[in-house]
Amino acid sequence: MTEHEHVRVAVIGSGFGGLGAAVRLRREGITDFVVLERAGSVGGTWRDNSYPGCACDVPSHLYSFSFAPHPDWPRTFSGQEHIRAYLEHVTDVFGLRPHLRFDSEVKMMTWDQEKLRWGIETSRGFLTADVVVSATGPLSDPKIPDIPGIDSFPGKVFHSARWDHDYDLRGKRVAMIGTGASAIQIVPAIQPDVSRLTLFQRTPPWVMPRVDRAITGAERWLHKQLPFTTQARRGLLWGIRELQVQAFTKRPDELGLVERLARRNMARAVHDPALRAKLTPDYRIGCKRILLSNTYYPALTRANVDVVASGLAKIDGSTLVAADGSTAEVDAIIFGTGFHVTDMPIADRVVGTEGRTLAEVWRDGMKSLRGATAAGFPNWMTIIGPNTGLGNSSMILMIESQLNYMADYVRQLDVLGGRAALDARPAAVEGWNDKVQERMLRTVWNTGGCTSWYLDANGRNTTIWPGTTTEFRSATRRVDLGEYEVLRAPGPNTPGPNTPGTRTPESRTKNSGTKGAKKVEAGA
């Protein structure tokens, strides 16, 4: 990176969202872009999460780009190493290497009101960009709770997303904190090797069987020889999940049958009534993420495993004390306590038109227009933004929808010509979020009786999309210029009264002025 490099588009992050954005930009004929990555390789969360047993809970053929089908998946549910290899493959096939800037952590992004561009300070220098696409992802920054006494603990401490592969767990007394998607994979993977495993469970998850198997050589040969069979397999997986959505979003009571199946799954593996009571949730299935495992419950029944049905309250030397007063002596603590999802750290590093950070604007909850743009942050958009998460299907479907929106956003800037920027109208942002939150009211995520990472500090669900992926794709197919204000830099490129798609500067609304730039209404 040169000291004062300027690019048309800067993409932040090289996981599925960032690499997908890079591919889409190239397919749109745009090559003047960079992908800024704080680590030394691509992969995002599938690079960072390398803990024992790490795998995806979405079928392989659905957890991949539609424009980059992979006929050679080894299993129906792929492991971390296979998904990361797939992302490296996508990087090479689509020629993305020249655009990558590794070890380039973004320290600050500041909107330049005079030049209508973003100034980006990274750990390797400074650059500017006309457009920023933030694809840092919600599962990128680990969250470790502030436990009293943790600094006094003499043993090893690490988060599941920062696994210490140099530390040998064999023969150790280990505490696993949390019972989320990572924990239920880690527990059975390490249980045979440790001398004692204590699971601190604040809330038990609902766990369904994982219908995983090796994909046969015949299947893989067929997918390679007849690509439409790969597409058909993907389509079937997608369709089944689309049909399930209404139970989550409109008729949570229909999930009672699924709940009974989950209880039977537990009963088959856990015969001890007392342990089964500890592991039985008291909320509607689907309220928290439904987990898939064939090995989690059996591992909890082993003689060297203790389940503490209470959260970790404090640490006294090597003694861990639960909220119910029970204790455990351990040599190592593994936190499977999730990520900063509703308070993403990147928001502290984005400074908009009024000199406020995105974190300040989102202090009362994340809000965006169509999960992509935020008022006061022109030419900035996010992939996997507010209310774009899914509870039962593949996030790649949502990412590709947002890539459609990104592509049209850049096209609209081309149509406007000159030095222009699009700033989401506050009324459009509020209107979109009001509709989303209204639909959210009857979903299982809001009515199921649980507290989950889908909810922010105010109890508002700013994470999940309350509809089908088809609905979201339709809503993000095109950019509606009526939802944006057009910013123009003063000078010879400022359009005249007859420029299509804009009105004259005299028609700009009150309180819409931006220092150093003309803000005009976009014509509907």
Image (cartoon, rainbow, N blue to C red):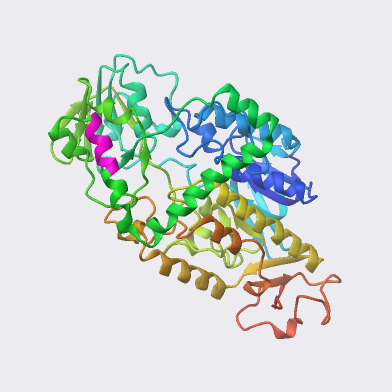
Residue 409 placement: quadrant: bottom right
Check if residue 265 falls in the magenta segment: yes
Q: Residue at x 31, y 38 (%)?
A: 179
Indicate the position of residue 153 as horizontal and vertical percent values: 28, 28
Q: Residue 23's quadrant in the figure?
A: top right
Q: x, y (%) of residue 41?
A: 62, 31
Residue 384 position (above or below residue 268): below
Q: From the image, which quarter does the N terminus lie in?
A: top right
Viewer-nearest residue: 151 or 400: 400
Q: Specify whether residue 90 is painted magenta.
A: no
The majority secondary structure of the magenta stretch comes to helix
Q: Residue at x 54, y 69 (%)?
A: 429
Closer to the camera in the image, 432 or 158:
432
Segment colored magenta: 261-269
Q: Is residue 350 left or right of residue 505?
A: left
Q: Is residue 516 visible?
A: no
